[in-house]
């Protein structure tokens, strides 16, 4: 894990701190922003099967057959305890619209089934995609990289931001000829979501396995520290 800090500083009642008589307490506030990053250790892949047919029954039946084959192949690859669940399903009519306008005609039906597969080994991400494609899946609806323990990384960023904000507040107080006597408050800013530092690369091609690069995930934390100084 690595972390970096971007610090923004603000005086609160700075004029009062400079002109206050001895013994008067002034407030100094500093805001620090820190980031912590780590490699993902969980991935969720949504594999899709799309089938089209002249009737709704045929489209649904063919979709069910292909999905069953995909699930069986994935269980064989990942084991019986594989984390899989259906996350979307649709069966809808397809219409053909005349170029010259007019009433559209029914062209058939499309059935779509999406299954989410969760793996905690990054080496299995490509296997999931390739196994699904070879057994009947024809779309990859999404691929997300996650952290199993996001809290640990967030705490690291919060600690770094808190230490930096306090140090900056003390430095500003010292520069103004004041001494910090106590911490008045510590406030956390709105917690942004975990974000990828760079985009994941998913390249389908003639290679034996689909190349997948998980990249790095980043958590950002903002902390404001207010201190009383004399």
Image: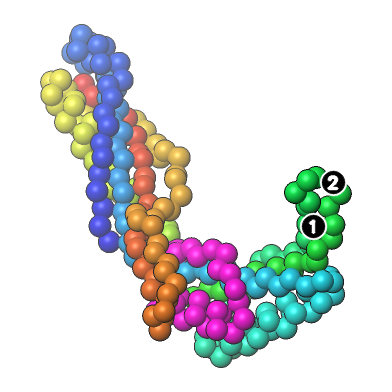
The quadrant holding residue 210 is bottom left
Q: Is residue 23 above or below residue 92?
A: above
Between 124 and 153, the one nearer to me in the picture: 124
Label of residue 217 in the image = none
Pinpoint residue 150: horizontal percent, then vertical percent. 43, 60
The residue sitting at 25% across, 36% down in the picture is 7
The residue sitting at 79% across, 66% down in the picture is 109
Pinpoint residue 41: horizontal percent, then vertical percent. 40, 70
Pinpoint residue 137: horizontal percent, then vertical percent. 60, 77
Q: Residues within 10 Å of mark 1 (few under 14, many from 20)?
A: few
Q: Quadrant of the C terminus?
A: top left
The quadrant holding residue 56 is bottom right
- Quickly name the residue at label 1: 95
N-terminal label among 1 and 2: 1
User: How many numbered marks have been drawn onto this rendered protein structure?
Assistant: 2
Q: Quadrant of the N terminus?
A: bottom left
The residue sitting at 24% across, 48% down in the picture is 4
- Quickly name the residue at label 2: 102
Say which of marks 1 and 2 sits in front: 2
């Amino acid at each position: 894990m690595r972390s970096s800090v971007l610090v923004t500083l603000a005086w609160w009642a700075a004029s009062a701190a400079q002109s206050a008589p001895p013994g008067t307490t002034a407030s100094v506030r500093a805001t620090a922003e820190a980031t912590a990053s780590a490699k993902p250790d969980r991935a969720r892949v949504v594999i899709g099967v799309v089938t089209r047919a002249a009737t709704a029954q045929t489209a649904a039946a063919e979709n069910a057959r292909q999905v069953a084959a995909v699930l069986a192949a994935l269980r064989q690859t990942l084991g019986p305890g594989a984390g899989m669940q259906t996350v979307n399903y649709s069966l809808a009519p397809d219409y053909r619209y005349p170029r010259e306008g007019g009433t559209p005609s029914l062209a058939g039906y499309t059935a779509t089934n999406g299954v989410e597969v969760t793996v905690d080994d990054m080496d299995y991400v490509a296997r999931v995609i390739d196994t699904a494609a070879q057994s009947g899946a024809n779309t990859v609806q999404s691929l997300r990289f996650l952290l199993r323990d996001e809290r640990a990384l967030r705490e690291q960023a919060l600690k770094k931001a808190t230490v930096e904000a306090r140090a900056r507040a003390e430095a500003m107080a010292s520069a103004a000829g004041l001494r910090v006597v106590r911490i008045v408050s510590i406030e956390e800013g709105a917690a942004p979501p975990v974000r990828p530092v760079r985009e994941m690369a998913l390249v389908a091609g003639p290679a034996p396995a689909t190349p997948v690069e998980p990249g790095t995930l980043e958590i950002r934390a903002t902390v404001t520290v207010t201190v009383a100084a004399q």
